[in-house]
Image (cartoon, rainbow, N blue to C red):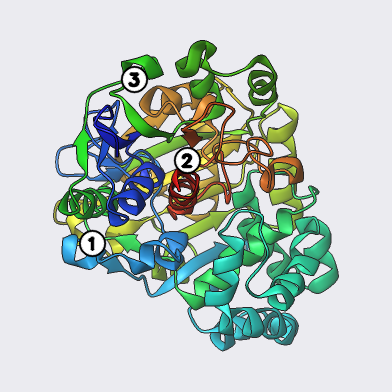
Amino acid sequence: MSETYRYDAVVVGAGPNGLAAAITLAQAGRSVVVYEAEATPGGGARSAELTLPGYVHDTCSAVYPLALGSPFFRTLPLAQHGLQWIHPAAPLAHPFDDGTAVVVERSIDATAANLGADGDAYRRLMNYFCAHWDGLAVDLLAPPQLPRHPLLLARFGLHGIRPAASFARSYFNSVRARAVFAGLAAHSMLPLEALGSAAFGLVLGIAAHAVGWPVARGGAQRLADALVSYARSLGVEIVTGRRIAALSELPKARAVLCDVTPRQLLAMAGNQLPDGFRKRLQRYRYGMGAFKIDWALSAPVPWKAADCARAATVHLGGTLEEVGASERAAARGAPSERPFVLVAQPSLFDKTRAPAGGHTLWGYCHVPHGSNLNMVQRIENQIERFAPGFRDRVLARSIRTPADLERHNANLVGGDINGGAANLGQLFLRPTMNLYKTAAPGLYLCSASTPPGGGVHGMCGHFAALQALKDES
């Protein structure tokens, strides 16, 4: 490297993708510095005492199937840097109004046994893909390129390209199986009638069996801490509490990788980007937002379906039709009266999360982008519906609207936790056809606004760093 460069690379943002980019570059022998605006690294993988002393809450993400299944993270010695995964007895529960629940077990056969006449269809769907998870993950968690396993990916694509609602209705006959798939697909933050929404349900369902839906012992922050520790062991410098308002504030480097969304990049880059490219970034679209609540509880959630206590993640939304109506309403700008609610109860499996006898609960629903409507009553009504007496156990709550989420993490624009809408137009070619590259030499995006998109897997940062290294040569 020329001596005119203080660093080989600068990374802006110490979220999982920014840290993955820094690690990839450092592994290649490059000198790297990371600047993080907040006092604590981690981005969407952070924890804090949001309610009462001793109650550790995950401020954004909480459950990590894609982190455990990430082709890149799996190569890193994160366990040696303090990361411990905890697997609940079951990955997921989906309760119904009759007091029963379908539990998605690690075992495909055990899950199928919960689905009655749809059990055989579920086995056919899951057995093949789970047996080939490693190959599937390599191709799905990647930018558009020649797939390493084309027949496997094509088989997945025939299912995944479909709208989740029509896929569930055509593949399953029972209310219960359709509902479980709807809940999985709703993680897409798309209407279930959207093309490609079935892919999200398939990936998360397959991952439940292939790798599990674990939580990090001690909280999401432990994942970030392990990435930071490993990065520093490679010589990466990490500077916290340093918000970068303009790229001109950065030290001179051969490459700059930004773990930010297009909106922040436009503000930071000033006139460094040509007008045509700026207009393309301005056309990038963000998706629906999240309204999040964290609770400190005096006792576990009193689920009517006792099996819900076996899972760290519980989907509250009843039938396919109800889940679909909730997501459709949020996408159209009118939050549902009965929103689909995703909850996580990590303290059932990780006693470090709360004082003796106490528990934490994490939950959110989808709302229109940037909505300022208070959803507390509606969310808690859904929990009470499946767990009567829940409110009696609430000691304190922390409430975060979409605007609060964005203030906490500037990448959560309008409360969008996926870095941009994951519709077909932006699922593969995001944020532009340039993917990680921008129109400015040496300037890259490495956030969830690039392929393969949202989720804590680090692959966006890893591939952006690979692109920077390729361009360097």
Q: In terms of sequence position, does the residue under pointer 3 or pointer 2 come before the other?
A: 3
Residue 446 tag number: 2
Mark 3 residue crowding within 10 angstroms, few (<14) / some (14–19) / many (20+)? some
The quadrant in which residue 59 appears is: top left
Image coords of residue 439 (percent x, y): 59, 28
The residue carrying mark 1 is 83
User: What residue is shown at x 32% (from left), y 38% (from top)?
Assistant: 14
The quadrant in which residue 253 appears is: top left
Q: Is residue 160 left or right of residue 75?
A: right
Q: Residue furthest front?
A: 2
**Which residue occupies the foreground of this view, 128 or 295?**
128
Type of amino acid at the residue the image marks with label 2: Cys
**What is the CA distance from the residue labelled 3 to the residue labelled 2?**
16 Å
Vertical order, 424 against 421 (above or below): below
Image coords of residue 108 (percent x, y): 57, 83
**What is the CA distance from the residue labelled 1 to the residue labelled 2?**
23 Å
Image coords of residue 109 (percent x, y): 58, 88
The residue carrying mark 3 is 244
Vertical order, 157 against 289 (above or below): below
**Which residue occupies the foreground of this view, 251 or 43?**
251
Image coords of residue 19 (percent x, y): 33, 46
- Contact (CB < 8 A) between labels 1 and 3? no
Q: Is residue 319 left or right of residue 20?
A: right
